[in-house]
Image: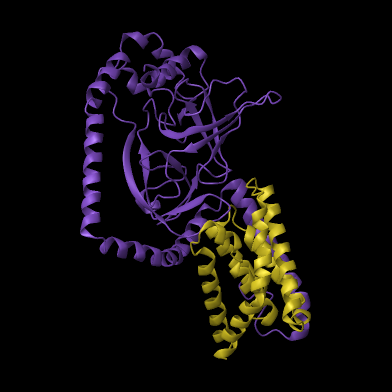
Chain colours: A purple, B yellow
Amino acid sequence: MAAFGTGGRRPLQGRGGSAGLSFTFYAVLAVIAMYLDQRQHYLERVRYGLQAAAYPIQLAVSSPPAAWHWLTDVFQTRDALRAENAQLRSQQRDLEVRTMRYEALARENGALRGLKAALPPVAERWLAAEIVTVQVNGLRQRVLLNRGATNGVFRGQAVLDDHGLIGQTTHVGPWSAEVILITDPEHAVPVRIERTGLATLAVGAGDTSTLALPYLPANADIQRGDLLVTSGLGGVFPEGYPVARVTEVHRDAVQPLAQVRAAPLARIDMDTEVMLVWFREGHPAAPSAVIPAPHAVGEVKAGNALLQPQAAEHAAPPGPGPAPATGAPPAAATSAPQGTP
Amino acid sequence: MSGDSRLRLLLSALVALILTVLPLPVWADVLRPAFLVLTVLFWSVNAPRTGGIAFGFFAGLMLDVFQGPVLGEHALALALISYIAVREHQRIRSKPSFQQALIVCAALVIYEVVLFAIDGWTGHPVTSPLRWVHTVTGALIWPPAAAILAYGAGRRA
């Protein structure tokens, strides 16, 4: 096929016509490929294979920076290591103190929500992944990770670092995955203002330090310094993970919408290692299941019992399907931990 | 002979691909010429039967995997400009390198227009004017790049 039309040993005279024919053939092929990839997602398998072929090249390109990293690590001075060690130690102590009452709070929260036992954490499993230092696309905010389908990574998986949300996977190859960052102009995260509970969307602004909140009315209760957390709507990110902090609020008298900007909490341009997260299905804070699965109904005590059988009947259509009354208990349940400061 | 030149073609494409994905700081990345596109143009003009439209198509497909939102986008753009280059290769080849650079600039603009249109139609628009910078830097780097490629292509012939 590669020799079609441009054929190696074709006489010179015939080439003009055959170039046009060959171009027509490849143009049609390209258009079909675009149509299938865009509309039907038929080409996932093809892309999967091509991504496998591309990965060795990407890995080779990223190896000099990786080797440099390794070298600087190896030749770090004893003092620097000791200082880092001390810093990590104090950081660990801080974190331990902070999580000391976590068990007790989780149990208390469970009791308040009428559950027999505290809910397990929504994140079930983590996998650390390294960012492969290759240019994916300068004008788009994408990065490549060194984990893929063989590690169980799937399309649309949430990616976090230790400060906040980073993005989600878009194309998954066998050993690598492309991540669209929350700062990409094509990406929008459903967020909630932690202080007020107001839900909106945070859209990428195209550089690593800015998110825009373009859909807030001018009189919305939002101010500089407000924390934005994921709202759990949209089906990708679970509820309650930190995303960004509001940096700028402009209210223009002639414009119906406020111009709000926020800075992502994740250190997107400095990260070399990130976390891929698997979330527990059926958990109230999980992204997909808004309504508890029928088997979980038995664990719910009297307070919600009147509403539960109805919710169980309507369990099939997730999200906005059921009537407001039946939709209320899970919504109330999910906002409970943040709603009682 | 044909196998040898095909090998050199693939080698130059691999080098160009590596230069395309090499991590650079943001300002340098904006200036980075589209090396693989220049390589496709060089082969289309200087060895239209070795390179040509098929080479352009598959090189574009590789670019799609590395950085395209849709499979087939760069493949179409590269097939188009390699078709133009193959058709006009005798006329382009006889020009002095300054005029060649101007033609390359025009070809890069056509390439970028195709990408821009497809980006928009498929709903992945990048409207930043910075995306056009590489058409100029690509034209500027064409004379030395073509000389290097010609040296590589001729050396082991």
- Report if residue A234 is visible in the image: no
Q: Position of residue B30 (x, y in %)?
A: 59, 59
Q: Nearer the viewer, residue A10 or A92?
A: A92
Above or below B66: residue B11: below
Q: Position of residue A27 (x, y in %)?
A: 70, 62
Task: Name the residue located 59 percent from the left edge and 69 percent from the top edge.
Answer: B36
- Report if residue A72 is visible in the image: yes
- For the C terminus of chain B, the quadrant is bottom right
Q: Position of residue A131 (x, y in %)?
A: 41, 54
Q: Nearer the viewer, residue A18 or A249?
A: A249
Res A16 → quadrant? bottom right
B108 sits left or right of A330 in the view = right
A129 sits left or right of A214 in the view = left
Res B123 → quadrant? top right
Task: Name the residue located 53 percent from the left edge and 81 percent from the top edge.
Answer: B7
Task: Name the residue located 75 percent from the left edge and 67 percent from the top edge.
Answer: B106
- For the N terminus of chain B, the quadrant is bottom right
Q: Nearer the viewer, residue A322 or A89?
A: A89
Res B49 → quadrant? bottom right
Q: Position of residue A8 (x, y in %)?
A: 65, 82
Task: Name the residue located 39 percent from the left edge and 55 percent from the top edge.
Answer: A146
